[in-house]
Image (spheres, grey):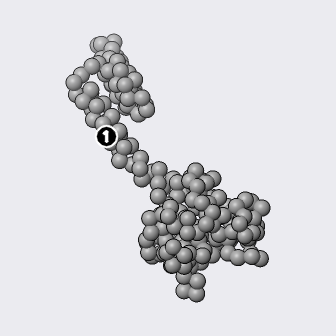
């Protein structure tokens, strides 16, 4: 009787343990990035059932849709972050204002914006504020997003440009005698309009 009871306990334990391992293996396999290999491995562990194939197909479709839906947004967001990060970095490097400059040895306002976009986003804006106006979709300053350009002066005759970094701040090459730095938007030197680079 004891032997029979022990065998039953052992059988129940092995069955329970085997089911747990199979379930854990199937869950682990479903987390693999290659969905075709995942489905084949899943079917090998669980046995090919219509229900598990449908689950794998649904999982694949859902993750593909999520990737497609977020691709454009992610690219724009990562580009803006790269622009803001580089602009902030330049603001800590004691780069002097140099009229016509566009290097780490010296920059003017449009040289700064062209340098940042060329190095962070592989976009060449041109080295002149009015040229850069043509590279953006204009918007009010109140709608500026990090990475947007801020312009001072009338459209078609702007005289200053900077990179908006968020929280009412921008990075600029202000004027002779000053370095590239972070400044705050104020009513004393209010930008005329903003623009998102096309």
Horizontally, residue 171 falls left or right of residue 179, namely left
Residue at point 24%, 22% (across, down): 49
Residue position marked by numbered label 1 in the rendering? 62
Residue at point 54%, 86% (across, down): 187
Q: Position of residue 71 (x, y in %)?
A: 41, 47
Q: Nearer the viewer, residue 133 or 43?
A: 133
State whether residue 165 appears in this view.
Answer: no
Horizontally, residue 172 falls left or right of residue 194, namely right
Q: Nearer the viewer, residue 181 or 132?
A: 132
Secondary structure category for the residue under label 1: helix
In the picture, residue 137 is in which quadrant? bottom left
State whether residue 91 appears in this view.
Answer: yes
Q: Residue placed farthest to the bottom in the image? A: 188
Q: Quadrant of the N terminus?
A: top left
Q: Nearer the viewer, residue 1 or 172?
A: 172
Q: Position of residue 168 (x, y in %)?
A: 53, 75
Q: Residue placed farthest to the front in the image? A: 156
Give neighbour class at mark 1: few <14, some 14-19, many 20+ (Cα, 10 Å): few
Q: Tell me: residue 48, above or below residue 81.
A: above
In the picture, residue 26 is in which quadrant? top left
Residue at point 45%, 51% (across, down): 74
């Amino acid at each position: 009787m004891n032997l029979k009871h022990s065998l039953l306990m052992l059988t129940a334990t092995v069955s329970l343990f085997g089911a747990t391992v199979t379930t854990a293996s199937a869950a682990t396999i479903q987390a693999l990035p290659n969905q075709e290999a995942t489905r084949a491995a899943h079917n090998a562990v669980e046995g090919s059932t219509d229900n598990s194939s449908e689950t794998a197909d649904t999982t694949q479709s859902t993750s593909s849709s999520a990737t497609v839906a977020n691709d454009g947004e992610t690219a724009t967001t990562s580009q803006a972050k790269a622009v803001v990060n580089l602009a902030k970095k330049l603001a800590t490097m004691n780069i002097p204002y140099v009229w016509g400059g566009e290097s780490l040895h010296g920059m003017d306002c449009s040289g700064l914006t062209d340098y940042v976009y060329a190095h962070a986003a592989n976009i060449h804006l041109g080295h002149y504020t009015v040229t850069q106006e043509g590279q953006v979709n204009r918007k009010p300053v109140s709608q500026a997003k990090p990475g947007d350009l801020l312009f001072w002066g009338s459209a078609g005759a702007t005289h200053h440009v900077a990179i908006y970094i968020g929280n009412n701040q921008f990075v600029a090459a202000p004027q002779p005698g000053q370095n590239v730095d972070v400044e705050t938007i104020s009513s004393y030197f209010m930008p005329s309009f903003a623009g998102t680079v096309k």
